[in-house]
Image (cartoon, grey):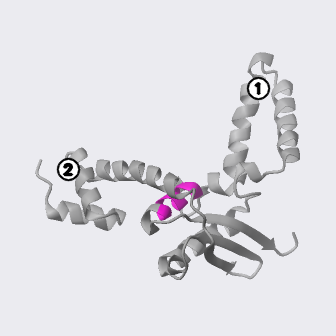
Amino acid sequence: MEITAKMVKELRDKTKVGLMDCKKALNEAKGDIDEAIKILRKKGIAKAAEKSTRKAKEGIIYSYIHPGSKIGVLLELSCETDFVARNEKFKKLTKKIAMHIAATNPLSISQEDINQKVIEEEKEIYTAQAINSGKPEKIIDRIVEGRLKKFYKENCLLNQALVMDENITIQQLLTESIVEFGENISISRFARFQIGK
């Protein structure tokens, strides 16, 4: 199938990836735009992984107050250059993540940040629940492991599905942003405030 300039432009508009990469992905996908997007996303993850080792010393601190003024979030989103930090798209990304934090109230950025005591307590609870429900002893460890994965997915910011688009996680959103901006982007810290809590 012939790859036309119109097809390349359509793919570029959808992905914000360079023209040559778009053309290569379309060739590989035999002209299928959706398949080409998947190919680019897979390659983007590899590029993002390379960039994630670089130091992100710039960025912004963003404050978000949810309508009604009962919930507020302070978020530090880091990047490598002041040029990206001042970019309007970067600010929109920061706002999107802050709004997500306001809605979901995560315990931590990643599962590595959760206090080990909390994890041990969760394991104890899940083990007791499995035993009390009469599950065979040989599968209790697998049940506990499965419930812990669910716990991380619900409570660790990077593992959570984005509230505005549940097809991607916060980690995937960051990975796509790393590819788009061409430099490392990371969530350094956040604090969520709620009246009465």
Instruction: Decide whether the magenta segment is chiefly helix, strand or loop.
Output: helix
Q: What distance separates the C-alpha of mark 2 from that of mark 1?
A: 46 Å
Q: Residue at x 72, y 74 (%)?
A: 73
Residue of label 2? 31
Residue 139 figure quarter: top right
Please state if 167 lies on the left or on the right of 149 as rendered. left
Query: Is disc 2 placed on a helix, strand or loop?
Result: loop
Instruction: Find the residue positioned furthest to the left.
Output: 2
Please say whether residue 129 is visible from this viewpoint. yes
The relative height of residue 196 versus residue 114 in the rendered view (above or below) is: below
Query: Is disc 1 placed on a helix, strand or loop?
Result: helix
Q: Amino acid at mark 2?
A: Gly
Viewer-proximal residue among 146 and 31: 31
The relative height of residue 95 versus residue 1 in the rendered view (above or below) is: below
Where's residue 57, x and y in %?
Answer: 63, 71
Q: Residue at x 34, y 48 (%)?
A: 39
Please say whether residue 99 is visible from this viewpoint. no
Please state if 163 lies on the left or on the right of 135 as rendered. left
Q: Amino acid at mark 1?
A: Asp
Magenta stretch encompasses residue 132: no
Q: Between disc 2 and disc 1, whose residue precedes? A: 2
Where's residue 38, x and y in %?
Answer: 36, 49
Callout 1: 10 Å neighbours few (<14), some, many (20+)?
some
Residue of label 1? 141
Where's residue 30, x and y in %?
Answer: 20, 45
Callout 2: 10 Å neighbours few (<14), some, many (20+)?
some
Please state if 139 lies on the left or on the right of 22 as rendered. right
Where's residue 102, x and y in %?
Answer: 70, 69
Count the numbered circles shown.
2
Q: Which residues are magenta?
A: 169-178
Q: Residue at x 87, y 69 (%)?
A: 197
The relative height of residue 171 versus residue 72 in the rendered view (above or below) is: above
